[in-house]
Image (cartoon, rainbow, N blue to C red):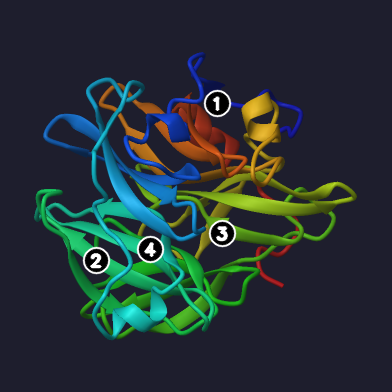
Amino acid sequence: MNYFKISPFKRYPGNPILKKGNIPYPVNTVFNAGACKYNNMIYLLLRVEDKRGISHLTLARSKNGFDFKVDSHPFMTPANYEPYKTYEKFGIEDPRITHFEDGTYYILYTANSYYRPRIGIARTYDFEKVERISLISEPINKNAALFSEKIKGKFARLDRPDDESIWISYSPDLIYWGNSKVLLSPRMGRWDCLKIGAAAPPIKTEKGWLMLYHGVRPTAAGRLYRLGGALLDLEDPEKVIGISDGFLLGPEEPYERVGDIGNVIFPCGIVVENNGELKLYYGAADSCIAVATANLPDLIDCCLFKSKEEFRR
């Protein structure tokens, strides 16, 4: 890919699609939403931060993927029972939703507490009831996303246990995880030189698993969060087929530049329509939610760059 190529994404003209004023109860902000399709509608699982600074998760629904109605009450709040209570004391954050063919929707989220962030996993079948399965990592770990099918008979997930690189791990039962390996590391001198993290669950395509990720670069004005992508081998996702040369989407609009944390594009949710249109749902400046669309084949093409650099350090 030529890194001067225009971004494959187009922002929705009505952005931002959700702001704190759209939440039907008092909050500080809304951002970083997981996404999926259920009952022919698009569901967003919003990270909502209350005025104490503690986050919970609330559902929003849409027929067209742009106009959402937000529930009047949270879907998940920090647990009041152990072992979750201790580790969710400061909130639950940044959900990613993965749908399996058996009808299960798995939610990977960040549990935050005195003991720093770690990963939790829950499941739902109907978005009416939700069941926590386990806390599946030690601190410090976040940005977890589950593959939508088993890899060689095991569940597979992406995460960031070292606060820098994307790792891949495997589990027979969604509780006990191991065989962890570094998948992708920041690239020195590039737009993603400080740290990277999975943006949403990988998407299975004919050419490989499409993994979008956020990358961070330090600047004199603070950290800059942008979006990139990589393509992983279908049979062995530890093999990186290609990576975007430059970033694919970066903060440009006022709602992405100015907010609680400025210059941030932070996606957690992706929906692929039957016509190949991809909808990317992202938190903007930690203060609202926006959506951008892309043609899936165009996006895959952007992730086929053969870097001479090592994908891992």
Q: Residue at x 40, y 43 (%)?
A: 269
Q: Residue 227 sits in which quadrant?
A: top right
Q: Residue furthest top?
A: 13
Disc 3: CA contacts within 10 A as few (<14), some (14-19) or many (>=20) = many
Pick the front one: 72 or 204 = 72
Real-space Cα distance between discs 1 and 3? 19 Å
The answer to whether residue 222 is left or right of residue 157 is right
Q: Residue at label 4?
A: 109
* First along the sequence among labels 2 and 4: 4
Residue 61 percent across, percent down from the top left: 24, 32
Amino acid type indicated by mark 4: Tyr
Real-space Cα distance between discs 4 and 3? 13 Å
* First along the sequence among labels 1 and 3: 1
Residue 178 percent across, percent down from the top left: 39, 85
Real-space Cα distance between discs 2 and 3? 20 Å
Residue 32 percent across, percent down from the top left: 47, 46
> Image quadrant for the C terminus?
bottom right
Report the label total: 4
Amino acid type indicated by mark 2: Ala
* First along the sequence among labels 4 and 3: 4
Q: Which disc number belongs to residue 9?
A: 1
Real-space Cα distance between discs 1 and 4? 26 Å
Q: Residue at label 3?
A: 197
Q: Residue at x 38, y 63 (%)?
A: 109
Q: Residue 92 sits in which quadrant?
A: bottom left
Disc 2: CA contacts within 10 A as few (<14), some (14-19) or many (>=20) = some
Mark whose residue sits in front, 2 or 1: 2
The answer to whether residue 96 is above or below residue 229 is: below
Mark whose residue sits in front, 1 or 4: 4
